[in-house]
Amino acid sequence: EAQVTQNPRYLITVTGKKLTVTCSQNMNHEYMSWYRQDPGLGLRQIYYSMNVEVTDKGDVPEGYKVSRKEKRNFPLILESPSPNQTSLYFCASRRAGTDTQYFGPGTRLTVL
Amino acid sequence: AQSVTQLGSHVSVSEGALVLLRCNYSSSVPPYLFWYVQYPNQGLQLLLKYTSAATLVKGINGFEAEFKKSETSFHLTKPSAHMSDAAEYFCAVSDTGTASKLTFGTGTRLQVTL
């Protein structure tokens, strides 16, 4: 089944404790993105990647890191999480030359 | 910079009534426009998209949207609401045609009542 998976789905952590949210897609898509969803703000793009080893900032990259060492994986790294990063995070992927993004189920992160 | 504005954070309709969710865009170049739906505790699913072909776009689940350049609008409609349509709906715009960067509206939560 074609899908985008994220882990964990739920995470509660404390300020300053490094964490990684994984994202994996099995569709061989070139493009991958991370978004955060906050009430009243919709979804905002954090980072995106156009292919292996190619990443770029989205609208709200501060406090986040990403890497794209393999085509299928695009982890989101929070080196020192803060409470304002409490949010619902979505990973998405897309095939080059197309315009439809496929979204993962989301990761709900709470930073205390 | 491109942006979309969704008028109304909450819309309530009766089952069987017309659904109209509003989206206005701002873009310096011809935009690509999308409507996504998010059911409770799920990710986003593409409903339909406008990519400079026909201005009236039909999507899944009986939804459609019309691109009106003169009004910079891309409103989502459905003639008859079903209870299963209750969800949050997001309008999004991309000006590159590649959707590497989708800019989303703030969302409209649709409630369907009996």
Image (cartoon, rainbow, N blue to C red):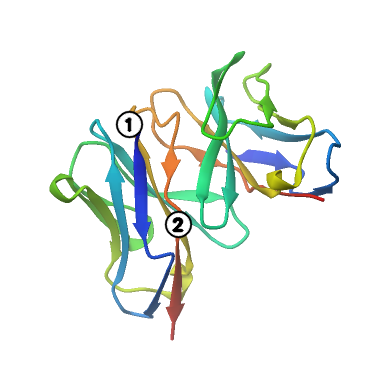
Query: Which residue is at 25% across, 32% downward?
Result: B28
Whether residue A36 sits left or right of residue A111 in the image: it is: left
Residue B27 found in image quarter:
top left
Q: Is residue A51 above or below residue A108?
A: above
SS for tag 2? loop
Residue B51 found in image quarter:
top left
Give residue A11's position: percent from left, percent from top.
79, 48
SS for tag 1? loop
Sooner in the amino-acid sequence: mark 1 or mark 2: 1
Quadrant containing the N terminus of chain B is top left
Q: Mark 2 points at which residue?
A: B107
Which mark is on residue B45?
none
Give residue B26's position: percent from left, percent from top.
28, 42
Q: Name the residue under label 1.
A: B95
Whether residue B78 sits left or right of residue A62 in the image: it is: left
Q: From the viewer's side, name the closer residue of A91 and B85.
A: A91
Give residue A45's position: percent from left, percent from top.
53, 36
Q: From the viewer's side, name the closer residue of A108 and B87.
A: A108
Query: Which residue is at 20% across, 38% downward?
Result: B53
Q: From the viewer's side, name the closer residue of A26 and B110.
A: B110
- CB atoms of marks 1 and 2 within 8 Å: no
Residue ranking furthest to the bottom = B114
Q: Is residue B108 above or below residue B46?
A: below
Query: Which residue is at 31% across, 78% downward?
Result: B17
Q: Which chain carries label 2?
A: B
Q: Mark 1 lies on which chain?
A: B
- What is the three-letter code of the residue carrying label 2? Gly
Could you classify mark 2 by the number of other residues whose Cα lies within 10 Å: few (under 14), some (14-19), or many (20 or more)? many
Count the marks: 2
Q: From the viewer's side, name the closer residue of A98 and A108.
A: A108
